Amino acid sequence: MKIVPISLPTPFYIGPVNVYLIAEDPLTMIDTGPKTKEAIDALRAGLRAAGYLVSDLRRIVLTHAHEDHCGLARSLRDEAKNAEVLVHEWETGHRHSRLQYEEHRSLLVRAGVPEDEIETMRRMYEGVRRYADSFDDHEHGPLWDEAELEFESGSLRILHTPGHTPGSCSFVREADRTVIAGDCVLKRITPNPVLSPDPIDPSKRFPSLAEYLVSLARLRAFAPTMVYGGHGGPVNDYEELFNRYLRAMRERQAQVIKLVSKKGSTAWDVAQKMFPGADDVHRFLAVSEAVAHLDLAHSEGKIGLEISGSKELYKKAG
């Protein structure tokens, strides 16, 4: 099975995004890049270098529905004369702008984020949304955990690997233990456990960090020989990365616990102390990071949690 990495420019702080052409029948694109002229030009060039055109695509598969990964999906589908689009049913970013729904606002209120900050975050994501077209539910098919994407010369096993987002998926070629992991595995940085409503019960918060740890362990069970991530170079020593991630998470959790006051702190309080210079999208990501580590620490009995009005207050254990 021939996997062709293609690097595309993005307008985001993360830098270029990696998308992957599976040069087998049916010709498949895993992730698409953002909806910009620069990205589509680079994608066309990458396809031409591999001997293909956009019109040759028959299947578009999304690891998750963030703009840098799904932005061109509709355009590619249309140009390829209705290529099949597949995404996990727990992904909602492909539908409408994040933070648009009341359940998103409710999560931020519970985290102690002031109303003016919530409105600023919402407007910011409205601006980001121009880098992707939305899909209605009937316009894409589902990715099922443990199912297979079949090709002429083999298959890729679908693994539901939530954490960065609820519906994040990875794809494993078991013949040589190669993995395409989207933003579940990044060589130089740990992915942000983005604050999200629970797909089963949107009134609840998705336990992103706890789920992410399970996802990392699931991938580890395959003993990957090569992991292609959504950004940066490939990982050829997954065991080293796995242990590095765990150390980084333990260190961040210890930092978060220290920032919780005896009288009680909201996730927003902790985020402000942890990332005092955060601006723009980083303020939302800072809250996501704080909430994820606070939730995990609370689930492990390391801190307490009380409800104060509409806000959640975390307190030192004991």
Image (cartoon, rainbow, N blue to C red):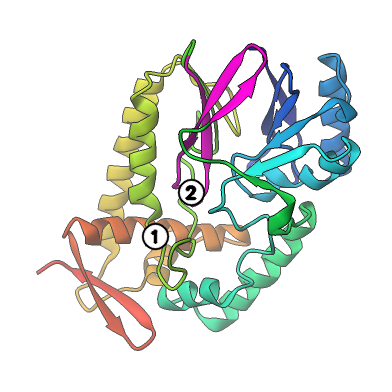
Instruction: Determine the residue positioned at 29% across, 53% down.
Output: 255
In the image, residue 241 lies in the stretch drawn in magenta: no
Q: Secondary structure at mark 2?
A: loop
Q: Is residue 263 visible?
A: yes
Residue placed furthest toward the left: 318
Dot 2 and dot 1 residues touching (CB under 8 Å): no
Q: Amino acid at mark 2?
A: Asn
| Mark carried by residue 192 | 2
- The local crowd at label 2, few if under 14, some if 14 to 19, many if 20 or more residues have their Cα within 10 Å, is some
Disc 1 residue crowd, few under 14, some 14–19, many 20+, Cα 10 Å? many
Q: Does residue 253 appear to the left or right of 197 in the view shown?
A: left
Quadrant in which the C terminus is drawn: bottom left
148 up-or-down from 266: above or below: above
Residue beneath disc 1: 290
Query: Which x, y percent locates residue 231?
Result: 60, 33
- Residue lying farthest to the bottom in this orientation: 309
User: Residue at 56% across / 52% down in the picture?
Assistant: 89
Q: Amino acid at mark 1?
A: Ala
Does residue 13 appear in this view?
A: no
Q: Nearer the viewer, residue 283 or 67?
A: 67
User: Residue 63 vs residue 60: left or right?
Assistant: left
Query: Range of the magenta residues?
Result: 148-174
